[in-house]
Image: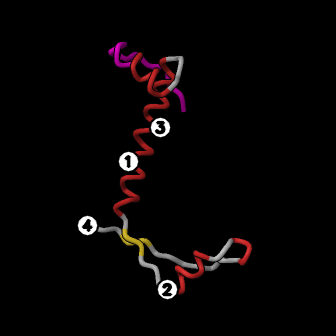
Amino acid sequence: MTKRTSLNLDFALVDEAKEVLETKETTETIHKALREVVRNERLRRLSRRRFDFSNEDLDALRTSRSENAAGVSVSPRATA
């Protein structure tokens, strides 16, 4: 969903973000910056999760995809 809105922006910061993100338009810059923030948070959360693998699971994951490693079930556990 896209919604037109008005924002008070620090254009020096927007210009710096355009350089860093390699974007041209302000809207493109804001969208890309927001996607990066969300992506980084998702990666941070993922990095804190604990995954339990059995030796069999690890062996199956190490085999090539052509050898059909499907069927391996791994349950992530959140850590406090």
Q: Position of residue 15 (x, y in %)?
A: 41, 16
Q: Which residues are magenta?
A: 1-14
Question: In the image shown, does 4 or 30 lie closer to the viewer?
Answer: 30
Residue 70 position within the rendered picture, expressed as x and y whole percent measured from the top left: 65, 76
Q: Assign the magenta stretch its main secondary structure.
A: loop
Up the image or down, 6 lies above or below 38; here it is above
Which amino acid type is marked by label 2?
Answer: Asn
Any part of residue 8 in sight: no
Q: Using the rendered view, name the quadrant where residue 61 is placed.
A: bottom right
Categorize mark 3 by other alpha carbons within 10 Å: few (<14), some (14-19), many (20+). few
Marks 1 and 2 sit apart, C-alpha to C-alpha, by: 30 Å
User: Residue 41, labelled with which disc?
Assistant: 1
The numbered mark, 2 or 3, whose residue comes first in the sequence reads: 3
Q: Residue furthest right?
A: 66
Report how far apart the C-alphas of labels 4 and 2 lie in the structure: 25 Å
Q: Which residue is mark 2?
A: 55
Residue corresponding to mark 4: 80
Callout 3: SS = helix
Residue where numbered disc 3 is placed:
35
- Residue depth check, mark 4 versus mark 2: number of the one nearer the observer: 2
Task: Give me the C-alpha separation between circle 4 and circle 3.
Answer: 26 Å
Identify the residue at image location x=37%, y=70%. 50
Q: CA distance from mark 1 to mark 3?
A: 10 Å
- At x 36%, y 53%, the residue is 44
Q: Residues within 10 Å of mark 4 (few under 14, many from 20)?
A: few
Q: Name the residue type under label 1.
A: Glu
Q: Is residue 78 left or right of residue 30?
A: left
Does 63 sit above or below residue 34? below
Q: Earlier in the sequence, mark 1 or mark 2?
A: 1
